[in-house]
Image (spheres, rainbow, N blue to C red):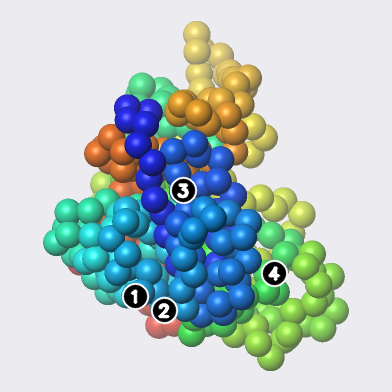
Amino acid sequence: MAEKRIVKVGIIGCGGIANGKHMPSLKQLPNVEMVAFCDIIVERAETAKAKYGTPDAKVYENYKDLLADESIEVVHVCTPNRSHSFITVDALDAGKHVMCEKPMAINSAEARKMLDAQKRSGKKLTIGYQSRQAAGAQYLKQEALDGTFGEIYYAKATALRRRAVPTWGVFLNEYEQGGGPLIDIGTHSLDLTLWLMDNYKPKYCVGTSYHKLNKDTNQGNAWGNWDPEKFTVEDSAFGFIVMENGATINLESSWAINMLDVREATTCICGTKAGADLYDGVRINGIRNNSQYVLRPTLNPQGAAFYEGVNNADPSVMEAAQWINAVVTDTDPCVLPEQAYTVTRILEGIYESAKTGQPYYFD
């Protein structure tokens, strides 16, 4: 990294995503210290401090007390979706750079408040779409920048699980999360697809959502049975998105669907010169010398951008590394808030279309 200074980070929300991604990843960065932990269940913050924090790290129950600590430069917001917006806005206004876990917000109005706060504060804001940091995604992005695909006019964003409904936390709670698989895993596939297409101008979308399997008692779920009475979000949702330039995207998302061809956080893109997918490693297809070809590059596990002192090419670690590097070097993070805002707008449009049975037009 350009500078060797230590970046002091505060964690707001010490539940599943903080323990599964953010804190273990930050722990691997040599120039990061986690100096504050906040959770409405104080015991979780205490546990996080013991495992990831500095010896003198602080523990808070109220996130505003954490934000009052002027030594903290960066805040990671790892709370349920409903609170992403107001915590992020408060953190930006308190002079902190913010990494907010995906999705950006529970709806586009809340996401807009985050964008406005970022511009008002002049601080950096990024959203946790770590799928971009996978070696295959980085490879395809470079191919797209090199013009390999020509104009990408069709894509399929896929996030399908056969029976893998998350039964912990508040995933099944529509009030807290804003939705089910579409906003949880579909958001990753859509973000990845828009990024590879470099297209953030939707025109309209059509969506459907289903509550077909929520009440099942014969579940066969990967993480144990869910409570049918608490499963208030959709089990599947699908969207057809038309962009202003005429490009189209099919978005598929499900936590539980009777299908064998399942995969998530993946995409297929089709351009005028070539196409590609991430279904079985990286596959690029096209025509050369009047013959069809399929290219399967052998990727170095360090295929993503290299950061000094980082030896783990796991996408979550690479996400943390590029984010902290952006703070230290005063450069843009990989995921710009304006891009994440467009993802949220499209997800909202699909949900709204599913409710009304009509196409949803973007302003």
Q: Secondary structure at mark 4?
A: loop
Q: Amino acid at mark 3?
A: Glu
Tell me, for residue 64, which label it has, or none. 1
In the picture shown, does residue 122 fall above or below 218?
above
Q: Earlier in the sequence, mark 1 or mark 3?
A: 3
Mark 2 = which residue? 62
Q: Earlier in the sequence, mark 3 or mark 2?
A: 3
In the picture shown, does residue 31 fall above or below 236?
above
Q: Amino acid at mark 2?
A: Asn
Q: Nearer the viewer, residue 116 or 160?
A: 116
Can I make out residue 85 in this image? no
Circle 2 crowding by C-alpha within 10 Å: few under 14, some 14–19, many from 20: few
How far apart are labels 4 and 2 at the CA level? 31 Å
Number of marks in the image?
4
Circle 4 crowding by C-alpha within 10 Å: few under 14, some 14–19, many from 20: many
| Quadrant the C terminus occupies | bottom left
Q: For residue 291, what is the image quadrant?
A: top right
Mark 4 = which residue? 165
